[in-house]
Image (cartoon, grey):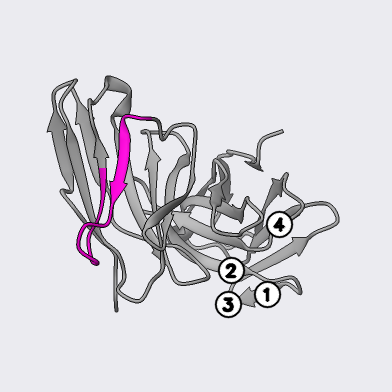
């Protein structure tokens, strides 16, 4: 099983749609979880951290399910500018200093 | 806003040549990282560095790779004898304790 696994997509959605991505991780000792966004040929940028109780930032909601070892990202009211690759990032060692990326889920929002 | 800076932005080299990629992490950060991303593929962990020594490294980070923090501000990645398959975008990142902050990357092309 891959350490951090994501559906590569692409997810093609119309503007205004709600879309959700999941990410599964294999290390049950993982403590920190993040969603990053990467535009084509650019560096990854932090979208949001994922907290145990779940958290929301505007149109974005992140959830953590430790029992099933997955995190999710929900995007409401999709904008054209949301088109990007969304990367799930998880600490993958017990010391918490090694962060492993999933392969990313590509989102295309169409007019 | 403090940022991670990387130089050069693009380097073209001949197979077998040595390459040094440079990074200036955010000044109060304690953990430094190199990741690479081959075009169209996932972001892969290479090495993490803490307290002036390597804390973790991946299988990719073999004897051809080395890292240094020569002067308290720069953090360098050296590839001793480049191969064609080293062609990729190399991202430097730093963190204090939470999320990673990435530089804009150095694109390495090995001919």
The answer to if B83 sits in the magenta stretch is: no
Q: Nearer the viewer, mark 3 or mark 4?
A: 4
- Give the magenta range: B63-77
Q: What chain is tagged by disc 1?
A: A
Asked whether disc 2 touches disc 1, contact meaning CB atoms under 8 Å apart, the reply is: yes
Q: What chain is tagged by disc 4?
A: A
* Quarter of the figure that contains the C terminus of chain B: top left
- Sequence order check, earlier mark of 2 and 1: 2
Give the residue pinned by disc 4: A71
Image vertical order of residue B107 relative to residue A47, above or below? above
Nearer to me, A103 or B82? B82
Give the residue pinned by disc 1: A55
The residue shown at (35%, 76%) is: B28
Judge if badges 3 and 4 mark residues of a common chain.
Answer: yes
**Mark 2 crowd level (few <14, some 14–19, many ≥20, 10 Å Cα):** some
Q: Which label number is shown at residue A58?
A: 3
Judge if badges 1 and 3 mark residues of a common chain.
Answer: yes
Mark 1 element type: strand
- Sequence order check, earlier mark of 3 and 4: 3
Residue B37 percent location from the top left of the image:
39, 39
Q: What chain is tagged by disc 2?
A: A
Q: Is residue A24 left or right of residue A89?
A: right
Judge if badges 3 and 2 mark residues of a common chain.
Answer: yes
Residue B24 percent location from the top left of the image:
24, 62
Q: Which label number is shown at residue A49?
A: 2
- Sequence order check, earlier mark of 3 and 2: 2
Image vertical order of residue A51 relative to residue B42, above or below? below
- CA gap between label 1 and label 4 equals 11 Å
Residue B12 location, quadrant:
top left
Nearer to me, A111 or A84? A84
- CA gap between label 3 and label 2 equals 14 Å
């Amino acid at each position: 099983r891959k350490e951090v696994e994501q559906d590569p997509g692409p997810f093609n959605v119309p503007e205004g749609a709600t879309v959700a991505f999941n990410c599964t991780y294999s290390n049950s000792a993982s403590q920190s979880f993040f969603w990053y966004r990467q535009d084509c040929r650019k560096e990854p940028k932090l979208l949001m951290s994922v907290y145990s109780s779940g958290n929301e930032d505007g149109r974005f909601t992140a959830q953590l399910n430790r029992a099933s070892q997955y995190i999710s990202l929900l995007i409401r009211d999709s904008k054209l500018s949301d088109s990007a690759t969304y990367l799930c990032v998880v600490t993958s060692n017990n010391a918490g200093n090694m962060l492993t990326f999933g392969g990313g889920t590509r989102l295309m929002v169409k007019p | 806003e403090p940022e991670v800076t990387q130089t050069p932005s693009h380097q073209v080299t001949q197979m077998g040549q040595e390459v040094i990629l440079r990074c200036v992490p955010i000044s109060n950060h304690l953990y430094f990282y190199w990741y690479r991303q081959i075009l169209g593929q996932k972001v892969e962990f290479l090495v993490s560095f803490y307290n002036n020594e390597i804390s973790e490294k991946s299988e990719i980070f073999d004897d051809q790779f080395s890292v240094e923090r020569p002067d308290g501000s720069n953090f360098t990645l050296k590839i001793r004898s480049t191969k064609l398959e080293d062609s990729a975008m190399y991202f430097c990142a730093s963190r204090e304790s939470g999320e990673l902050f990435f530089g804009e990357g150095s694109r390495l092309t090995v001919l």
